[in-house]
């Protein structure tokens, strides 16, 4: 179904940086009324100032930490109260926990990944979709990752959370059927963001990730908004990676071969467990700072 974004009321999580920030700016430029959510209040105000300066409507700022159980449910209520309704829900917030599984296990950092990347989006769906059903219209966009198809050493928690998100996204699409509510999955590959910079610090994965070609959050946002307008169910970015969806076993084989070639450089005694995100560990914070100093677009 074709969708006109102008006037749509949009809740987007993880909007303070990276893909979420770029999406917010692109949607605002199309005339959407936004509620932007993230942990870092100053970054959200900076985003709101940029949108306003560009002629867009000032977004509603909703500061929240989706790694804490219960906050997503509260966020849904706040967004509905501030916007009046939510026409488009974009579950974009994501964090990582980097480390070998025998060091991480089920530590709190690993549980935060699933609370943020999986349980909070489901809580937001529960908070918003019933209202969409009453109106007979709406759109849910879940941001997963091509890492659901190809993971790397040290990145299993993030990759598995995105695999789980892909499964529930497809299930939600089947459940909503012909209700008038659309479901879209956004599958980014490597994108030049602070998160990718953090991921490059992961035990076992860093030197592999540094050699990958990457896209930009701005180009992804433009493609995503175009896909929303055209009523697409799925968007892979960069587009040249779309074949991975149809040849997943080949992708995994090639990834395994790459890792085997790098085996000698992987230190299995590396005991680091790295929490990513704006409230992450010093290693992640340094990676984010280095990325920002490099002057790359958010």
Image: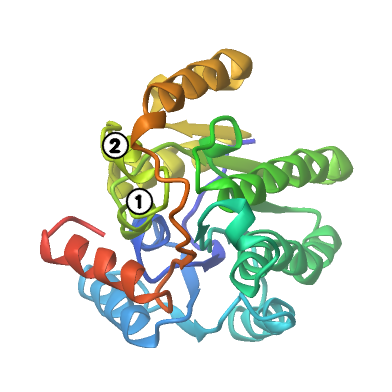
Say which residue appears at 67% left-offset and 42% top-offset: 163
**Image quarter (top left, top right, bottom left or bottom right) of the N terminus:** top right
Q: Residue at x 76, y 69 (%)?
A: 123
Q: Nearer the viewer, residue 13 or 155?
A: 155
What's the CA distance linking mark 2 and mark 1? 9 Å
Q: Is residue 48 visible?
A: yes
Horizontal and vertical percent position of residue 3: 56, 44
Judged from the image, the secondary structure of the residue bearing numbered disc 1 is helix
Asked whether residue 246 is in view, the answer is no
Q: Is residue 100 above or below residue 211?
A: below
| Residue 104 left/right relative to 271 | right
For the residues labelled 2 and 1, say whether their Cβ atoms are less than 8 Å apart.
Answer: yes
Q: Which residue is mark 1?
A: 196
Residue found farthest to the front: 269
Instruction: Tell me where residue 193 sits by quadrant.
Output: bottom left
Secondary structure at badge 2 equals loop
Q: Position of residue 41 (x, y in %)?
A: 39, 86
**In the figure, 120 relative to 200: above or below?**
below
Name the residue that disc number 2 marks.
214
């Amino acid at each position: 179904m074709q969708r006109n974004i102008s006037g749509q009321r949009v809740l987007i999580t993880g909007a303070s940086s990276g893909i979420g920030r770029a999406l917010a700016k692109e949607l605002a430029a199309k005339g959407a009324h936004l509620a932007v959510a993230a942990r870092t209040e100053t970054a959200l105000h900076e985003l709101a100032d940029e949108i306003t300066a560009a002629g867009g409507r000032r977004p509603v700022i909703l500061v929240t930490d989706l790694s804490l159980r219960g906050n997503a449910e509260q966020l849904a209520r706040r967004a509905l109260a501030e916007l009046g309704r939510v026409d488009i829900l974009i579950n974009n917030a994501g964090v990582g926990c980097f480390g070998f599984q025998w060091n991480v296990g089920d530590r709190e950092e690993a549980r935060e990944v699933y609370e943020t990347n999986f349980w909070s989006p489901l809580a937001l769906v529960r908070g918003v979709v019933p209202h969409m059903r009453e109106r007979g219209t709406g759109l849910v966009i879940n941001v997963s990752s091509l890492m659901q198809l190809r993971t790397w050493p040290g990145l299993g928690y993030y990759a598995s959370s995105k695999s789980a998100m892909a499964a529930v996204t497809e299930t939600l699409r089947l459940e909503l059927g012909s209700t008038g509510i659309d479901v879209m999955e956004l599958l980014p590959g490597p994108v030049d963001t602070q998160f990718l910079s953090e991921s490059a610090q992961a035990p076992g994965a860093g030197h592999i990730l540094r050699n990958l070609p990457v896209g930009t959050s701005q180009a992804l946002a433009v493609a995503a908004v175009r896909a929303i307008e055209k009523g697409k169910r799925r968007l892979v970015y960069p587009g040249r990676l779309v074949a991975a969806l149809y040849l997943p076993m080949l992708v995994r084989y090639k990834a395994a071969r790459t890792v085997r070639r790098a085996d000698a450089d992987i230190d299995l005694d590396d005991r680091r467990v790295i929490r990513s995100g704006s409230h992450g560990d010093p290693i992640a914070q340094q990676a984010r700072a280095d990325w920002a100093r490099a002057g790359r677009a958010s």
